[in-house]
Amino acid sequence: MAEPTPAGGEGVAWVFPGQGSQWVGMGRTLAATDADAAAVFATVDAALGFALSAIVFDGPEDALRETANQQPAILAVSVAYHAVLRARGLLPDAALVAGHSLGEYAALVAAGALDLGDAARLVRRRGELMTEHGAGAMAAIIGLPPAAVAEVAAEAGAEVANFNAPDQTVVSGHHDAVATVMALATARGAKRALLLPVSGAFHSSLMAPVAAAMRPLLAATPLRRAHPPLVGNVAARPIAEPDTLREELVGHICAPVRWVDVVSTLTEAGVGTFYEVGPGRVLAGLVARCARGARTITAEALL
């Protein structure tokens, strides 16, 4: 099993969660009590042309789980937390930012590279396209080294979608291929193999039509230099220039999320404290498993 990267630096990173971190009611109290948060939800609602905030705050849960709603919902809540934490002086300056898949959009809003309204429209369309091309499945393999999971995936005709932690790798592909991976991984010593509740084979070549459709939309969207830079999912290196950011947002649709490498890059850059800016604490848990000694702080713990 791969060892976690030691983390002893004094630098700060903001990290933003992706799909699956949502629940009905997230952000409701924040929006009701803080004008900065309310303004974020109002901007997203106006950009989308309907009251997404009503679904986020009151459900129904089935509507929030729809990929086309879930993605802008997590974006809105993440950006709302960021706005409030910064306004209250609770979120120190970051040396770098990162996001887990969808979370890269919130990271780029926070880094000043992307306007919130544009980000909301982009992730709404991204979710619609992922639903439209939603054939396939995903499964998390727990307790088997990433290289062994990649080997099993190749044998089964599936692909690695997420390198989430040294002991957690997600595979993606056609239903039969993912089922074969689950069976083979269990036979080879995996502690668990869990089918994920998602609508398609995200971060695989099956998403190529989504990437092709998103490319012209991103080309037409104004982007600025990211400050601080984004450590991207695709190559796990800092990027900041608009054209490079566009390539990242297209590329991560089919490429695996290299979260272990992202965290390693951050720690090697001197980051020792990771602020998870968004709903839940999924990334805090993954960072702790990737970086030995890292300090993780969630937005919810600060408010």
Image (cartoon, helix red, strand yellow):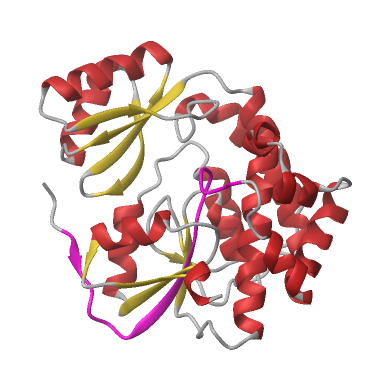
Q: Height in image: 119 above or below 192?
A: below
Task: State yes or no: residue 9 in magenta.
Answer: yes
Q: What is the number of callouts on the image?
A: 0
- Magenta: predominant secondary structure element? loop
- 170 versus 233 height, above or below: above
Relative vertical location of residue 168 with respect to residue 259 in this rendering, above or below: above
Horizontal arrangement in the rendering, residue 275 relative to residue 184 (left or right): right
The residue lying at 47 percent from left, 53 percent from top is 100
Question: Can residue 209 be seen?
Answer: yes
- In the drawing, does residue 94 fall left or right of residue 209? left
Picture quadrant of residue 80: bottom right
Q: Residue placed at 30% from the left, 57% from the top?
A: 261
Left or right position of 136 against 145: right
> Which residue does the image show at 51% across and 76% down from the upper left?
302
Q: Nearer the viewer, residue 230 or 7?
A: 7
Q: Could you say where residue 62 lies in the image, as x and y percent from the top left? A: 66, 31
Nearer to us in this view, 174 or 294: 294
- Which of the 4 image quadrants contains residue 6? bottom left
Position of the C terminus, as image quadrant, is bottom right
53 relative to 25 in the view: left or right = right
Q: Which residues are magenta?
A: 4-23
Residue 134 in percent (x, y) is at 58, 23
Where is residue 23 shown, x and y percent of the image?
A: 58, 47
- Residue 77 x/y as whole percent: 65, 59
The answer to whether residue 242 of the structure is visible from this angle is no
- The single residue placed furthest to the top in the displayed view is 176
The image quadrant of residue 245 is bottom right
Magenta span includes 268 = no
